[in-house]
Image: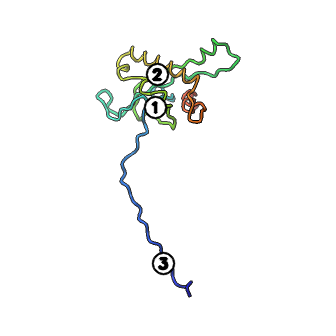
Amino acid sequence: LAQALPQPKPPRVLLQIRPFTGMGKFLKAGRIVLLLQGRYAGKKAIIVKVFDDSSKARPFGHCLVAGVERPPLKVTKRMSKKKITRRTHVKPFVKYVNYNHIMPTRYQVPSEIQPAALVTDQQMDSADGRVEARKYVKNLLQEKFQAPPPDKLGKPSKDVIYLRRKLRF
């Protein structure tokens, strides 16, 4: 008799719906991105500074990036010191890029490589400043590529290793 009676339904739980506040910002300083258009298409770069608001010179969202035009080549034990120094050279670049022309990756450079200190807006205003910025970026990247900073587990940082490798496409 007790089995024949219908069981009462459990009470309905209403889901709380939060208002949509917009997309989170993922293009931040330190994010490694791929350039999709122009002279450096297919090259990897680090976002140095983001400009969400447009300016008179660039009426669109853009960012300042410092990247690797030519990554270091493979080195073996049998190579001479001269050959090793030649093959570990890095050719960097610095430029402003439209948001539409970059693709963010999941990688972000370690905090000890301070992205904001790589290049400044004042350096980008003059040709001499850009040369100076490229020299600084070159020295920093060569140093970090030869001895990548350790991650939380003490292993070499995968983010710096990713930046060091040539993109295969």
Tag 1 secondary structure: loop
Residue type at mark 3 is: Pro
Q: Which residue is mark 3?
A: 8
Q: Which mark is residue 72?
A: none
**Label 3 – label 1 distance at C-alpha:** 57 Å
Q: Which residue is most to the right?
A: 78
Specify which label sits upstream in the sequence, 2 or 1: 1
Whether residue 16 sits left or right of residue 84 in the image: it is left
- Choose top left, top right, bottom left or bottom right for residue 62: top left
- Identify which residue is drawn at 47% across, 36% down: 104
Tag 3 secondary structure: loop
**Vertical arrangement, residue 109 with respect to residue 136, above or below:** below
Q: Which residue is most to the bottom?
A: 1
Q: How many marks?
A: 3
Residue type at mark 2 is: Phe
- Identify which residue is drawn at 56% across, 88% down: 1
Whether residue 73 sits left or right of residue 29 in the image: it is right
Task: Tell us which disc is closer to us: 2 or 1.
Answer: 1
Q: Which residue is mark 1?
A: 30
> Badge 1 local density, few (<14 within 10 Å), some, or many (20+)?
many
**Label 3 – label 2 distance at C-alpha:** 70 Å
Residue 22 in the image: x percent, y percent?
Answer: 37, 47
- Identify which residue is drawn at 36% across, 48% down: 21
Q: Which residue is mark 2?
A: 93
